[in-house]
Amino acid sequence: MMVHIQEPKFPWEIVHMDWVTALPPGGDRSYNACLVLVDRYRKTPMFLPYHKDDTAMDTAMVIWSNIISHTGLFQNGISERDPNLTSALCTNLHTLFRKKLSQGLWWNTRVAWHSGIKNSLGGLQKNQEITRKILL
């Protein structure tokens, strides 16, 4: 069954995620996989070194430090991976934001990420403003 994916209106609003595994170890930390995130608006890929045995929390930390800290929280993540992995990844991203945001903002951010709908804070631009304030 094909599902229509909405066209994003802002950069980093919708992100495709995939993992390239079974690579030969490389780099000073012997990475053996690559996490690929593609901004659907700009069609811009980000290639992040990764270990194929990393946990969902490790993945969330990689995404937080390399993507969200620079762009703000994206509203929808799309992956063809196992739903259990994707669910654990979302839960861990929420955990990171819960530690950073007050409870009121947390629920709006959670709704925006989990369901892919714009939240009551004003969409992606507001999420980016919030993220910048968190990181300062």
Image (cartoon, rainbow, N blue to C red):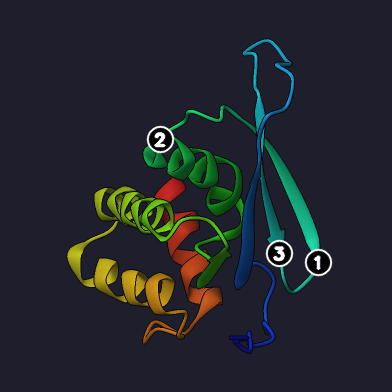
Mark 3 and mark 1 in contact (Cβ < 8 Å)? yes
Residue placed most toward the observer, 82 or 18? 82
The quarter of the rendered structure image containing the N terminus is bottom right
- Identified at 68% across, 10% down, the residue is 28
The residue carrying mark 1 is 43
Horizontal arrangement in the rendering, residue 106 relative to residue 21 (left or right): left
Horizontal arrangement in the rendering, residue 32 relative to residue 109 (left or right): right
> Which callout, 1 or 2, points at the residue further toward the start of the chain?
1
Q: Residues within 10 Å of mark 3 (few under 14, many from 20)?
A: many
Mark 3: secondary structure:
strand
Residue at the far front in the pictured view? 1
Q: x and y percent of residue 31 in the render? A: 65, 21
Mark 2 and mark 1 in contact (Cβ < 8 Å)? no
Indicate the amino acid at tag 2.
Answer: Thr
The residue carrying mark 2 is 55
The residue carrying mark 3 is 39
Mark 1–mark 3 Cα distance, whole angstroms, equals 5 Å
Q: x and y percent of residue 111 in the render? A: 34, 77
Q: x and y percent of residue 79 in the render? A: 56, 62
> Which callout, 2 or 3, points at the residue further toward the start of the chain?
3
Indicate the amino acid at tag 1.
Answer: Lys
Mark 3 and mark 2 in contact (Cβ < 8 Å)? no
Mark 1–mark 2 Cα distance, whole angstroms, equals 27 Å
Residue 136 in view, yes or no:
no
Residue at the far left in the pictured view? 103
State whether residue 24 is above or below residue 68. above
